[in-house]
Amino acid sequence: MKTGSSASAGKGDGPVYLDASALAKVYLKEKDSDALESFLLGRVDLMVSDLGITEVVSAIARKTREACLTPANAHKVYAAIRKDFDEGIYLRLDMGGAVHRRAEHLLMSAPDNAPLRAADALHLALALEAGARIIVTYDGRLATAAVNIAHLDVHPAP
């Protein structure tokens, strides 16, 4: 992951929360990975959670089981994620009781046009509790909820 002090003008005012669908695109070459890299390049306001890391590791394990990723490459990708996380490339968000209560409130108040799953509610709650202004997600349901419930900007725009 390349970050740094270069300006992030035109990329939206942060801080920026990356959910698992976005984080996966950073480490696994997928559709939209290059566009996401351009959006993130130079940002120093990126936030992720252990929840997101675990979800990405789950995707890596699935890709390995499906023979889309070799076990050796899977371990390299996992090591790169852990290295960036441990070196502070991202601001690490913890999921304490306040995050869970906020997620529960989001789940209980979600309108019919923006239904939430538990993990999505936790991602939204993490972003809100940390003061994120933008959430980066490639999950349509989470993007809809981020706009309609949490009133966050979403990248890419839904």
Image (cartoon, helix red, strand yellow):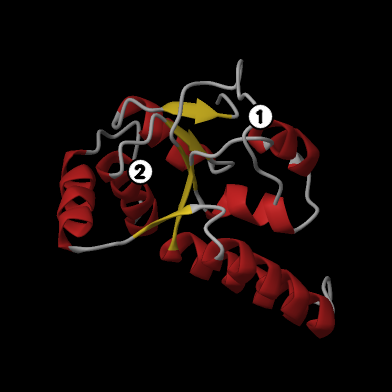
How far across and how far down the image is residue 156, in percent?
A: 60, 29
The local crowd at label 2, few if under 14, some if 14 to 19, many if 20 or more residues have their Cα within 10 Å, is: many
**What residue would you read off at disc 1?**
6
Residue at 25% across, 44% down: 129
Mark in the foreground, 2 or 1 = 1
Q: Residue furthest top?
A: 10
**What residue would you read off at disc 2?**
127
How far across and how far down the image is residue 12, in percent?
A: 52, 21
Left or right: where does residue 41 sit relative to residue 145? right
Left or right: where does residue 2 sit relative to residue 8? right
- Alpha-carbon distance for marks 2 and 1? 23 Å
Q: Secondary structure at mark 1?
A: loop
Q: Amino acid at mark 1?
A: Ser
Q: Which tag, 2 or 1, sits closer to the chain's start? A: 1
| CB contact under 8 Å: marks 2 and 1 | no
Where 106 sits versus 134, above or below? below
